[in-house]
Amino acid sequence: MDQSSATASHGGAIGMHGIKKWFGNFQAVNDVSLEIRSNEFFTLLGPSGCGKTTLLRMIAGFELPSEGSIRLDGAEIAHLMPNQRPVNTVFQNYALFPHLTVAENIGFGLKMLGKPKAEIEAVVAEMLKLVHLEARGNNLVTQLSGGQQQRVALARALAPRPKVLLLDEPLSALDLKLRKSMQIELKRLQAETGITFVFVTHDQEEALTMSDRIAVMSQGEVRQVGAPWEIYDRPAERFVADFIGETNFIDVDVVSVGTDRALVRLPSGAEIPATFPAGTQPSGKVTIVIRPEHASATASAATAPLSGTIHDIVYLGTDTHLHVRLADGSSFMIRLQNARSGPCGYSVGEEIGIEISDDVAQILRD
Amino acid sequence: MAKNFSIRRQPGFATLAMFSFFVLYLPIATLVVYAFNSGTSIATWEGFSLRWFQSAWQNQQVIEASIRSLQIASIAAVIATACATLAALATTRTAPYRGLTFKYSMVNMPLLVPEIVTAVALLILFSRIKVWTGYSGLGYLILAHSAFCVPFAYLPIRARLESMDLSLERAAADLYANAFQTFRYVTLPLLWPGILAGLMLAFVISLDDVVITEFVKSGGQDTLPTYMLGQLRRVVTPEMNAISTVFLMLSLAIVTVFFFLSRNPQKDDR
């Protein structure tokens, strides 16, 4: 690891192939292959128990994969001890050393690497500045607030200039406001240091806000990998669509399939184009998703592709949600942005048409 | 119901508690009081005096026995604590495996084995070794004391290790510390209060042991407790009270320090 200025370091790329992990009879990770690019803010997103933390711990070296290989910049690291990997972790509970000061905590990694004292002091000072804790270097970590401890944990993990920084739900212990500002802070640190960040969270909003790319996991498998907009707008399967944001599922018939769009027939008989996951060939009966904000209400029920009766109106400040009962009995949600003040202008029991924006429907893989 | 029930509000509780304390500490209080008796009786008060402390201080046998006791206790406590630390690390810093519970019981067994059994066993073993080697120094006593002090030192150290956050050691390893550095810079500093507590406990236990010492010691190897036992068979003067009082104060001091060290093991950790 070179010591150079903050911006010059180069994040490592991680390649995982055929990773499997059993704990006794329980398979925590089932055949995961992922390519994490250099300098990327990569998020492993999924509900608790989906295997995301196990995957992270295998990159750190706290768990060994039962099968498969992990490469860092092309070199196999799956068998190395944690202290032999140029990878540092920000732990969920921070795991700061209670008997050491803030500065000693931050300098710990460099000290273990046998760096000269002057160099350690310089890096520690730089790190304290990076996380805005210049005045707290000589405090014991137990004297700091939760948010400050969080920043010390970050500085401690960044100080040895790892090629990859692993973050295990580091924001989950903070209150909402602090969490929001730390999200921005993390994004800034990642951009400034150029270190590859691998971030684990179960919070979809956190993942969408910060990530360059997201891997959605469930039951030990990666369900979809993509940029936040792809995960949100082009979910490949029901689990992804359901886990991230709110959505409407509609059962439709495939009419024809083009190169990247298919034409589907809605229950009302109207036909709309829909995108589909790469590598699939939709046919017959399929399910499409339409996000609530991609639909809008119109008074002309007869000409709209979908129509129904409003059975619930939920006012949320920024938005209003209209819950519409369609002709076939299923429910459809529309999100209206409250662009003006005052009531939304609709009432429960009203018959409305639903317009669907262009190119927003996505066919799910079954 | 359980919430509202308090034993402290039961009739007679306070009286009974006071009485129990009284019975528990009366003999010791009497002993301490008569250490200051100016007469030669341990039952008839004749006036305040420090003469028996002075007399004990000038008694060559008492001084030699005290020094021997302290010597044995210090060395045995260090050896026992070192062994106990290793045992505690080996039984907590490992994935559970078959036989782990068996190991716990093996380490703690000396607490359950009647002391007299250990004493006789050591007597027989050491007398053989004495014949073979011709060595008859303090080593036997130190060895014996070290052995039965291990479980006492083991308990606080293991308790401390078990309450320690494992992710700290993981964090050290993540930050490039090898196994030895992790122990040196993270585990040991955090374990230190437990080790000190174990050391003191072992020291106190060794200091007042009678049974095993009585069986294992060679001629002229009296420790303070066995010397006092010997004296009691003859004429008893308040000198015994004076020695006991000093002994009591020393133990109390050590136990007090132990209490403060072992209190809230995680208090400074979070």
Image (cartoon, coloured by chain):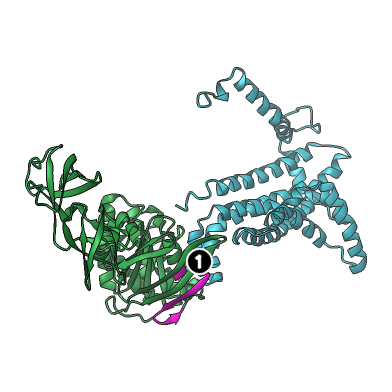
Task: State the image coordinates of residue B183 (x, y, percent, origin top left).
Answer: 55, 66
Residue shown at the point (93%, 65%) measured from the top left = B131
Local packing at callout 1 (Cα closer than 10 Å; few below 14, some 14-19, many 20+) is many
Image spot of residue A214 (x, y percent): 31, 65
| Residue beneath the point at 22% across and 73% down | A259
Q: Is residue A47 left or right of residue B12?
A: left
Q: Which chain is cyan?
A: B
In terms of depth relative to the viewer, which is nearer, A89 or B112? Answer: A89
**Color of chain A here?**
green
Where disc 1 sits, the SS reads strand
- The answer for which chain carries disc 1 is A
In-front residue for pair A117/A337: A337
Identify the residue shown where x is 88% and y is 55%.
Answer: B123
User: In the figure, residue A159 lies in which quadrant?
Assistant: bottom left
So how many labels did they put on this image?
1
Residue type (three-letter) at the residue carrying disc 1: Lys
The answer to whether A302 appears left or right of B4 in the picture is left
Magenta-colored span? A57-76
Queried whether the magenta region covers residue A73, the answer comes back as yes
Residue under label 1, please give it.
A21
Residue B28, above or below A202 = above
